[in-house]
Image: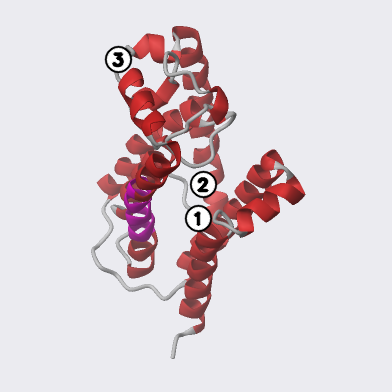
Amino acid sequence: MFAPGWTNYCVAFAVFFASHMILVRPPVRPILVRSLSERGFQIGYSLLSIGILYWLIDAAQTAPYIELWPWAGWQNWIPIIVMGPVCLIGALAIGTPNPFSFGGWKNDSFNPQKPGIVRWMRHPILVALFLWSAAHIVPNGNLAHVILFGAFALFSLLGMRILDRRQKRILGEKWFDFHRRTDKISLFRAIGTRVLLMRSAIGLLVYITLAYLHPMITDVFPFE
């Protein structure tokens, strides 16, 4: 029988993945979109996901501690360094039309001549999630956190393959056409220097904000 800490952890895990498997698929998603509008659904779903994620991280903190490898000071630098690109990718991806992946904003207006970050990665949010989770495995060598971050890393990789198959089926030849046309665009033409600088500044602000909010979630300040 599970100890109370493990029970809370398992329930949080089940709720998180159930919400991501049920709410975004037919027939539930279309019903919610009709009731809330597409934008309302995206906002509500994002807030719900953040709330459940907080619950899951807190549950991992209170689960029984089973060490898999000892902590060392250098390990903290892995997420400190990797979170820079994570925040940049997130800043470049949010609000960018992306017909290749889930979510996106105004995907019907996607312009292959100005694809933004989609020029380098079809699933930037999942790439950011993978980097975040993989980097956080290193300084968290206990069973609960390794399962948590390992599951997110695996979820990200599998999600990319699943979304590619689904979007190819939905878009048909248009998926391959978008892919061919975006591959020919250069770095600064894909995003634009001004947008790149603005989004990079936003990414830096998000990085600093997350660093200072980190103790409120995990009781650990990354730079200590």
Circle 1/circle 2 CB separation < 8 Å: yes
Whether residue 181 is situated above or below residue 35 in the rendered picture: above
Relative placement, left or right, of 153 versus 97 is left
Q: Point out the image quarter for the C terminus.
A: top left
Query: How far across and how far down the image is residue 180, in percent?
Result: 31, 22
Quadrant containing the N terminus is bottom left
SS of the residue at dot 1?
helix
Q: Residue 172, located in which quarter of the rendered image?
A: top left
Residues at circles 2 and 3 in contact by the CB criterion of under 8 Å: no
Q: What residue type is labelled 3?
A: Lys
Dot 2 or dot 3, earlier in sequence: 3
Q: How crowded is mark 3: few (under 14 residues within 10 Å), some or many (20 or more)?
A: few
Main secondary structure found in the magenta portion: helix
Relative depth, front residue between 154 and 4: 154
**Mark 2 residue type:** His
Find numbered disc 2 in the image and state the secondary structure of the residue it sits on.
helix
The answer to whether residue 153 is above or below residue 5 is above
Location of mark 1 (residue): 218
The residues tagged by marks 2 and 3 sit, at their Cα atoms, a distance apart of 40 Å
Q: Residue furthest right?
A: 35
Q: Position of residue 50 (x, y in %)?
A: 58, 51
> 79 or 177, which lies in front?
177
Instruction: Tell me the tag on residue 214.
Output: 2
For this rendering, which residue is in front, 96 or 197? 96
SS category of the residue bearing label 3? loop
Q: Give the range drawn in magenta.
A: 149-161
Q: How many labels does the image show?
A: 3
Of badges 3 and 1, the one in the foreground is 3
**Residue 110 on image: x %, y %:** 50, 23
Residue drawn 54% across and 30% down? 107
Which mark is drawn over residue 184? Answer: 3
What is the crowding at mark 2: few (fewer than 14 residues within 10 Å), some, or many (at least 20)? some
